[in-house]
């Protein structure tokens, strides 16, 4: 099948990289969820939050896969980078990590957008703006808000309170 408006090679390459990055984010959130679900840490609502974040990343990756298929390209997959947490990882460090993931993901979405602009691919640019820009900015806002609360509450009982009452978004 030859699509009427083929994706440029640069667009395909950057989208394939994004598919892997979203799946690596899944790995990372899954590892964070397991960390907080473990009885030594026992912050079960935080674990639930990161499991939900992990599921979202799989969904993001699928959206890019579906987009490639719609444009006549079969997705290919590269090896994923492993992610594991240190047993002493704190609540604040976990949310700081999550914020950095989301910022890195947004940066790479903009790399795809640049490739779309260079090849005059309005449809890809629109897809990125409609589906991902809003989502990414919202995720960053949410994580920044949680970090403010986590810092305000402090460690110990503060972490217990955050786990019990702090997570309002998911
Ligand atoms: Fe994502």
Image (cartoon, helix red, strand yellow):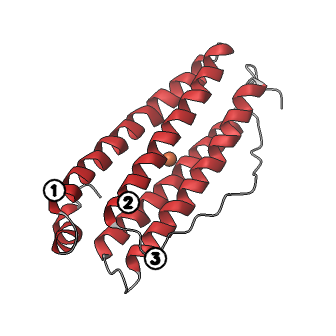
Residue appearing at x 76%, y 34% in the figure: 72
For marks 2 and 1 on the same chain, the one whose residue lies earlier in the sequence = 2
Could you say where residue 59 lies in the image, as x and y percent from the top left? Answer: 52, 52
Query: Which mark sits nearer the N-terminus, 1 or 3?
Result: 3
- The residue carrying pointer 3 sits among few (fewer than 14), some (14 to 19) or many (20 or more) residues within 10 Å by Cα, namely few
Which quarter of the rendered picture does the C terminus lie within?
Answer: bottom left
Q: How many residues crowd mark 1 within 10 Å: few (<14), some (14–19), many (20+)?
A: few
Residue 66 visible? The answer is yes
Q: Left or right: where does residue 60 sit relative to residue 90?
A: right
Q: Separation of disc 2 and disc 1 at Cα?
A: 14 Å
According to the picture, the residue beneath numbered tag 1 turns out to be 152
Which residue of the protein is positioned furthest toward the bottom in this rendering? Answer: 39
Asked if disc 3 is less than 8 Å from ligand 1, the answer is no
Does residue 58 appear anywhere in the picture? no
Q: Residue at x 56, y 68 (%)?
A: 84
Tell me if 135 is positioned left or right of 10 in this view. left
Secondary structure state at the residue bearing disc 2: helix
Q: Is residue 124 above or below residue 76?
A: above
Instruction: Name the residue beneath numbered marker 2.
Output: 93
**Residue on which the image places disc 3:** 87
Residue 62: where, in percent of width, then height? 59, 49
Which callout, 3 or 2, points at the residue further toward the start of the chain? 3
């Amino acid at each position: 099948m030859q699509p009427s408006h083929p994706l440029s090679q640069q667009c395909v390459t950057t989208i394939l990289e994004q598919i892997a990055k979203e799946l690596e984010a899944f790995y990372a959130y899954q590892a964070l969820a397991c960390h907080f679900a473990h009885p030594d840490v026992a912050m079960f609502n935080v674990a639930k939050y990161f499991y939900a974040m992990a599921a979202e990343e799989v969904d993001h990756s699928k959206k890019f896969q579906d987009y490639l298929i719609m444009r006549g390209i079969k997705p290919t997959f590269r090896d994923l980078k492993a992610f594991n947490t240190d047993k002493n990882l704190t609540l604040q460090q976990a949310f700081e990590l999550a914020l950095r993931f989301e910022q890195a993901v947004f940066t790479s979405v903009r790399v795809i957008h640049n490739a779309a602009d260079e090849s005059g691919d309005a449809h890809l640019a629109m897809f990125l703006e409609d589906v991902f820009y809003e989502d990414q900015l919202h995720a960053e806002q949410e994580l920044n808000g949680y970090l403010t609360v986590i810092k305000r509450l402090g460690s110990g009982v503060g972490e217990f309170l955050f786990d019990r009452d702090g997570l309002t978004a998911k």
